[in-house]
Each structure stands twice: as C-alpha cells, then as structure tokens.
Image (cartoon, rainbow, N blue to C red):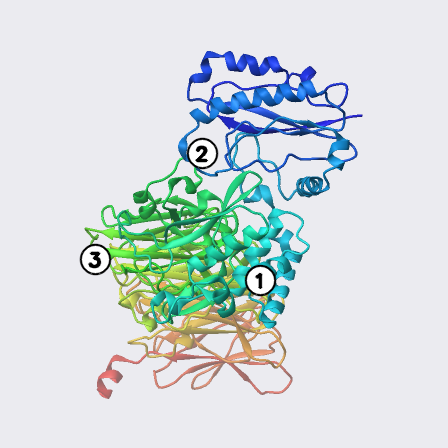
C-alpha cells in the first residue's frame, strides 16, 4: 500500500540537521522509523555545543484510508517533538529506543534554548517519538476524535502547513474570511437570540456559538465574531463620564466595555473550549494616542490577545475589530474590522507595541522608539494591498519639501489632508469625498505608485493624512495612513492653485474615459512666452471642456485664455497665460455621442509662467465655442479637406482664404467677431464666400490688427436652425487698414464667382472693371445713375467697365434669371468719399 510522507520542521539551537534516508523513511510494515545511530551521531557531534540551529524532521504517514496528524505540540516552540501515527505494528524495542533518544536531545536543547522562548508556555516539557498500533487508537475514542478533528482541518486546507523555516501567517490558516461565512452568520444569529433571552453566562454563550465548529480555528472565530458584534466600546467609561464595568457578566449584560473587557472575555471564552489564550499588555496607536509623545516611561494603556493554534502563536484584538470611536461626537461607530483577527505580526506592530518583547512575534523585534516614529497605518492600508515606499518614519523637510510615496497593485484613487499638528492621532474625519482643499502639495498617481510632494507654507509641524479607495468605487475615500512633517525652513514659493480633483497629471482612470496619452509627461509644465499647447491622445471620439485657474485671475479673463480643438483621435488645448505664477489646467471629457453622460475629470496640470506673458488685448475672443478648427463635428457634417487643419491662423497682411469641401451640400453661414475700434462697416462685410461645386472658399479681409473669431455654421435639417460646426481664431499682425468686401444678397448663390473687383469700397469718379460668373443668368448689369449691361465672354464670364461716380451713390450688381425684366440684386459696392466732401461735412 502506498504512503505519503509530509515533513514538518522544528527549530533547535544547533548547526546541523537530522535527515532521513529513503531506506529509513518507510519500513516494509508501513511504519516510519528513525535510526538510533543518527541521533547518536548528533549527540557525539562537537558542534552541538554552539548556539546554532539544527532541524529534526517529523514524518507523517497518510495512506488511502485516513490521514492522522500529530497532536498539537505543547507551547514551547523549539523542543524536539515528533509523533508518528501508523497503521502497522512496531516493536516495543523501537518505541522505547526513540523515546530515550528524544529525551536525551530534549535535555540538551532545553539548557541552550533562549529564556524568552522558554517562557512562552509552562507546558513546554517534551515531545516524544511514538509508534502506536491502529488497534490501540480505537481503544481511545476521545483522543481519536481529537486527532480526526485536526486531520480534517488539514485536509480542508484551512490550516495549511507552513513552509520549512517559515512562520505561519493567517493566510496559512485560511485563504479569506469568506470561508467563515456560514459560521459568522450562525454566531451573529445565535448572539442576538441569547441577548434577547438575557443569557449572560460565559459558558452557555460559548457552548451555543461554537456549536458545529469543527476545529479550534472555527471555535476561535466564533468567539471573535461574537465579541465584535455584541460588545461596544465604552466611550463614556474611557472618558471618565461613567463607571467602567468590571465583571464579565456586567460587560455582557450592558453590551459595552473597554479594551480589558474584550481581552478578558476573549481569554475566558477560549478557556471554555480549551484554546490557550494570553492577554497581552502594551501601547497602541488608538484613541488617546498623542503623536510625537515618548512612550518609554509611560505605563501601557491597551490590552489584546495572543492565541496558540497549531503550535504557533497568533495575535488578535477584538476591541479594534468591533469598530471605531468618533472623538468629535464622543460616540462609538460600530464597524466590524476583520483585519484584527489573527493579524500578521509584521502588520500588527505598526499599531500595537507589547510590554514584553516576545509578544511582538517578530524575528527582529523593534524598539519603542522605532514604534513611535513609524508611519501609522490603518487596517484599510493593508486590506487594500498598499505598500509604503517612503517615508518609513515621520519626516523633516529638505529645502522646504517632503515627498511621500505609496505603491499599489490594484488601480487606486488617492487624496490627502494636511493640517497643523494636533496631539491626538485619532481626530478629524475617517473618510473624505473626492476633493481636497489643500494647496500645499502635488499628488500624482502613476501606473503602480502614488507620489505626494509637500510644500508646507510656514515653519511648523504638520499632520498629513492619506485617503484612498479602489478605482471606480462609489464609496468615500477612507483613511489609510498618517505621519507628521516637520518643516524647519519653508521654501519661498508662489501660491499654488487648489486642486479639487484628487491628483495632478493624467488621472489613473483616464484610460477608461478614452484618454490614452498626453504630450505633457510631467505634472508640472514650464510655460514659455505665455503660450502653452496640450495634446491628449484618445482611443475614441471625445468632447472636452477646460478650466484654467490662477490665484489672481477672474473667470471672465480665464475664458479668453482657452481654445480647444476636438478631433476623432486627439484633443488639443491652447492656453494663454496673462499673469506670472502657477496655473491649474483641468480637462473634463465624455464620449462625443453620449450627450446624457456627465463630463469627468481626466487631466490636471500645474503650469508655471515665469517669463514673458500675453497681453490682455492678445487673448482669445470671449465667445469661442467648445470646438475650434476642423475636427469630429465638421467631419460628421461632411465638411472636409480644410486648407487649415489648425484652429489658429496668423496673417501678416490682414487677409487669408480658408477652403474646404461641403459634401452634404448644407446651407452654410459665417460670423466674424471682434471688438473693433475704427471700423466703418460691420464685420460681416469683411467675409466673402464663394461656393463652386462642392468646394467652399471663405475669403477674409481684416480691418485692423488683433484677434478675431470666425464661426462656421451649417443648417443640418431643412427649416432647422444653424448649428456651429467650428471656430477659427484669426490673429492679424498687420497694422494696415483693409477695405471691406461688397455687401452680398441671397441671390448670390452656389456657382457665383466674383473675379473683379474684389473690394467693396471703390474709388470715386473712376472706371471699374467688372468680371463675374453668374450661372443661369440671362442678363447681368451694374446700376449706378444708369444701367450698364455686362457682356458674356467665351469663358461664360460677364464683364465690362463701369464708371463709379461720386460717393453719394452705390453700385448695384444685378442679374435676371427669367424671361421677365425683373432684376435681382446680387451685391452692392460702396464708393469712397471725396476729400472735399469729407471736409464739407466737417
């Protein structure tokens, strides 16, 4: 019959180790035997006198019928112990020999073992190697039931054996608290029933809540859950407003108690089910803890428990697991916290420091000074899988700056709070909304880490709290850690705008919003010449809104500092900076087609302008739309092949042509706007549109220097309103005053082309050549005092010379399109004033 051999390691202060050869491990009879000579060799080894470690291996045999595990070793840790339960018979000589060898080794080891470890339990006497017949086991039903219970525990994977040389942690006992779901429900339900029946006897309660528990771990879990759900922290007793309850029955009846009440009850209840439990005294960073206070000569003020499971000690604190205290309202907030059930010592030590070093359960215990200086971490810090990169202790600024960095494995959102130092650690909010009002730090979140650069404003000590939640969670951000920052010499800095949107740079969840990249790699950008352009790469068509904030800038000026261009695969933001200092630039996006979806913050950058600034007269027009230049909106309307792909057009001569194609043959409309100082004519006279086939040419003649807005509108549905397709920003650098175009009427339609004259203001008393194409016209004339008919040439162009006359008259270009003699006005030209006419008017 086949057999499986499992190995379990015990530690001794020697340098060698006992090993079993393949011939020694399993005998023909199915027994595990250890040669006497191996132990004798060890005993004779001269190295045994040194304070090193040796390993003795216990072999456990499992066959096809059943798996029997060794009984729980008495508390003592390092004493030689091994029990092998086998099915076959073993001679009494072998049994006696092994017992003798183990006893000899035990005596030698006990003298060399450190006193601190010997004190962990008074039961650390000896462990023996025994071989017991299967028939003998049947004669001891109580012991067999106990062993079967432990074997089943191991088979279910709820108490996994630790790897050789490693200490077990809670995850070795159970993978997650979900395995206790049925047990927890039973305990909560039973606890409520017992409370309703006024049952306050500890033994009765323990028997009821542990009914059905299959092993020590489940019994302990039942006790823990009952304590956390039935005892509230006695805030009044802690503050001295009421008398503290002492006896267990009083605590259970009242349903409240302080830390010692939890630890006493836990110990008493564990005793009822035979679990070894110790009360541990020490300091904690809980209610009443004062940051920066030395604890070296202060009496400890907290109690918790240590329990022995599977031969190893574990830590738990039912007081902290029951909930939290709201000191502001002097009330208890019931909040079950599973983190403090069998907490790993490496995590427990951040908040609990025992009076006796041995109860740290650490390979390398820390000092009380180290405990005081460590960054305080809440249970949420560990349950969220966060990792402290720096600092490990409270920090002092370097050149007025301090940096905090956390790592994470799951996308996480962060914010922070910085306040002047307060004595009590547990004061202020335990949760935060999405925003922070602090302007003394820069928080950035990358793919797997968070960095917070702190710039305290004055020489002082500050408290910093970090809050976090998993990305896309709808719950508030919870407090995860705290530390103090001492700033002896603050840095002289300019005011930094507040950032209410959690972090600087690309938000960690920007990818889910469709933003996949940025032209700006750093969260801080230096602005040159007062002009900055930001380009975001997108995975799908988005629409964007921008916000620019400066401590000295009003909102109406801020609106004139932003222009955005929306394209199917990118978003471009043009920024102008009229003041020195820091600006916050925030961008908000949503899907282009989803008009019912709210805009969400995707990007926040800190812009620093310390050189040249843009004059207020050079800012963008105030009435810009959200989409400048060709982009998603124009493409969807069938407006394509623009001659200018950028929203910004600069001209040195005061004139330009913009061409594009109107694939859908929509009716178009154009608006030119600017606050002009010396213009005689409306700005509509400085736009002239030519529409041939599908090609549209918009000619612009700008009357004076400055910045203009050109809006292009289209009537998408017949009879509907015109919708803005895009805006162009025209910057005219020419000081020359340019003339207007003729005033165009509705009869001037598709296919009409004006070749000459291209200006709408003619010289007086002069002959002017007219050349124009008017499709479908039967007659084209220019009317001044009389009518001059133009002639149609071979190129289908109407042409002829017309005398302009005086400035008192206008020239009208007309055309007839039918057999009637009625003429339609196409456009009107003005004539400049004569100099003597202007003087006569003055």
What is the x, y in percent for residue 124?
51, 34
Disc 3 element:
loop
Whether tag 1 and tag 2 are in contact, CB under 8 A, the answer is: no
Measuring 49% from the left and 12% from the top, which residue is drawn there? 45
Which residue corresponds to mark 1?
Answer: 635
| Res. 333 visible in picture | yes
Q: Is residue 740 left or right of residue 75?
A: left
Closer to the camera, 612 or 687?
612
Disc 1 element:
helix
What is the x, y in percent for residue 283?
36, 51
Q: Is residue 654 above or below residue 525?
A: below
Q: Is residue 28 above or below residue 337?
A: above
Eye-nearest disc, 1 or 2: 2
Comes first in the chain, label 3 or label 1: 3
Classed neighbour count for the residue bearing mark 3: other residues with Cα under 10 Å, few (<14), some (14–19), many (≥20): some
Q: Which mark is residue 458?
A: 3
Closer to the camera, 365 or 103?
103
């Amino acid at each position: 019959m086949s057999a499986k051999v499992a190995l379990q390691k015990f530690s001794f202060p020697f340098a060698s180790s006992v090993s079993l050869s393949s011939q020694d491990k399993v005998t023909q009879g199915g027994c595990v035997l250890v040669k006497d000579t191996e132990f004798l060799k060890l005993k004779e080894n001269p190295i045994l006198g040194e304070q090193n470690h040796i390993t003795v291996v216990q072999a456990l045999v499992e066959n096809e019928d059943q798996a029997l595990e060794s009984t729980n070793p008495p508390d003592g840790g390092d004493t030689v112990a091994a029990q092998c339960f086998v099915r076959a018979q073993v001679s009494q000589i072998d049994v006696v020999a092994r017992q003798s060898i183990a006893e000899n080794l035990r005596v030698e080891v006990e003298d060399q073992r450190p006193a601190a470890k010997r004190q962990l339990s008074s039961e650390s006497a000896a462990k023996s190697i025994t071989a017991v017949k299967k028939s003998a086991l049947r004669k001891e039903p109580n012991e067999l039931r106990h062993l079967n219970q432990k074997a089943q525990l191991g088979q279910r994977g709820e108490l996994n054996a630790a790897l050789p040389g490693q200490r077990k942690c809670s995850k070795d006992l159970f993978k997650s608290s979900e395995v206790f779901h049925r047990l927890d429900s039973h305990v909560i339900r039973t606890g409520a029933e017992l409370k309703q029946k006024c049952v306050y006897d500890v033994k009765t309660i323990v028997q009821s809540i542990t009914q059905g528990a299959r092993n020590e771990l489940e019994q302990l879990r039942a006790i823990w859950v009952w304590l956390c759900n039935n005892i509230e922290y006695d805030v009044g007793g802690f503050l001295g407003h009421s008398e503290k309850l002492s006896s267990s029955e009083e605590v259970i009846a009242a349903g409240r108690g302080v830390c010692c009440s939890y630890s006493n009850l836990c110990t008493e209840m564990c005793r009822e089910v035979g679990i070894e439990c110790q009360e541990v005294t020490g300091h904690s960073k809980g209610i009443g803890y004062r940051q920066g206070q030395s604890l070296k000569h202060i009496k400890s003020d907290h109690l918790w428990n240590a329990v022995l499971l599977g031969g190893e000690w574990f830590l738990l604190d039912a007081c902290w697991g029951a909930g939290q205290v709201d000191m502001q309202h002097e009330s208890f907030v019931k909040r079950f916290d599973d983190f403090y059930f069998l907490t790993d010592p490496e995590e427990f030590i951040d908040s609990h420091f025992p009076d006796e070093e041995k109860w740290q359960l650490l390979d390398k215990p820390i000092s009380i000074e180290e405990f005081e200086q460590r960054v305080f971490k809440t249970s949420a810090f560990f349950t969220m899988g966060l990792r402290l990169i720096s600092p490990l202790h409270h920090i002092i600024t370097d050149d007025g700056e301090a940096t905090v960095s956390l790592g994470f494995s799951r996308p996480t959102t962060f914010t922070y709070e910085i306040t002047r130092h307060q004595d009590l650690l547990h004061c202020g909010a335990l949760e935060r909304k999405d925003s922070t009002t602090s302007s003394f730090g820069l928080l950035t979140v990358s793919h797997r880490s968070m960095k917070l650069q702190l710039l305290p404003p004055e020489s002082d000590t500050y408290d910093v709290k970090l809050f976090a939640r998993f990305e896309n969670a709808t719950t508030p951000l919870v407090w995860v850690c705290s530390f103090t920052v001492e700033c002896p010499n603050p840095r002289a800095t300019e005011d930094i705008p507040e950032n209410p949107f959690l972090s600087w740079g690309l938000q960690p969840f920007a990818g889910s919003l469709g933003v996949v990249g940025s032209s700006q790699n750093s969260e801080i950008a230096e602005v040159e010449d007062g002009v900055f352009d930001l380009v975001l790469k997108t995975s799908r068509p988005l629409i964007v809104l921008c916000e620019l904030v400066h401590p000295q800038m009003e909102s109406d000026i801020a609106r004139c500092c932003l222009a955005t261009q929306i394209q199917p695969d990118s978003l471009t933001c043009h920024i102008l900076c009229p003041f020195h200092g820091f600006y916050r630039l925030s961008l908000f996006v949503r899907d282009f087609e989803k008009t019912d979806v709210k805009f969400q913050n995707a990007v926040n950058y800190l812009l620093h302008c310390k050189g040249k600034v843009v004059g207020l007269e050079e800012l963008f027009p105030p009435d810009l739309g959200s989409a400048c230049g060709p982009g998603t909106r124009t493409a969807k309307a069938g407006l394509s092949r623009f001659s200018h792909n950028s929203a910004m057009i600069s001209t040195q001569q005061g004139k330009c042509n913009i061409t594009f194609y109107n694939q859908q043959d929509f009716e178009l409309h154009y608006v030119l706007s600017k606050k002009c100082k010396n213009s005689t004519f409306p700005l509509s006279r400085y736009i002239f549109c030519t529409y041939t086939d599908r090609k549209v040419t918009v000619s612009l003649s700008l009357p004076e220097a400055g910045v203009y807005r050109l809006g292009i509108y289209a009537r998408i549905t017949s009879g509907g309103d015109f919708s803005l397709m895009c805006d162009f920003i025209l910057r005219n650098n020419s000081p020359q005053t340019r003339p207007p175009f003729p005033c165009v009427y509705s009869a001037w339609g598709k296919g009409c082309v004006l070749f000459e004259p291209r200006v709408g203001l003619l010289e007086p008393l002069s002959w002017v050549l007219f050349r124009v194409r008017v499709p479908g016209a039967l007659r084209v004339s220019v009317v001044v005092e009389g009518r001059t008919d133009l002639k149609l040439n071979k190129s289908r162009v109407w042409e002829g010379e017309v005398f302009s006359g005086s400035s008192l008259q206008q020239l009208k270009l007309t055309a007839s399109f039918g057999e009637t003699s009625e003429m339609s006005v196409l456009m009107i030209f003005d004539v400049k004033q004569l100099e003597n006419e202007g003087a006569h008017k003055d």
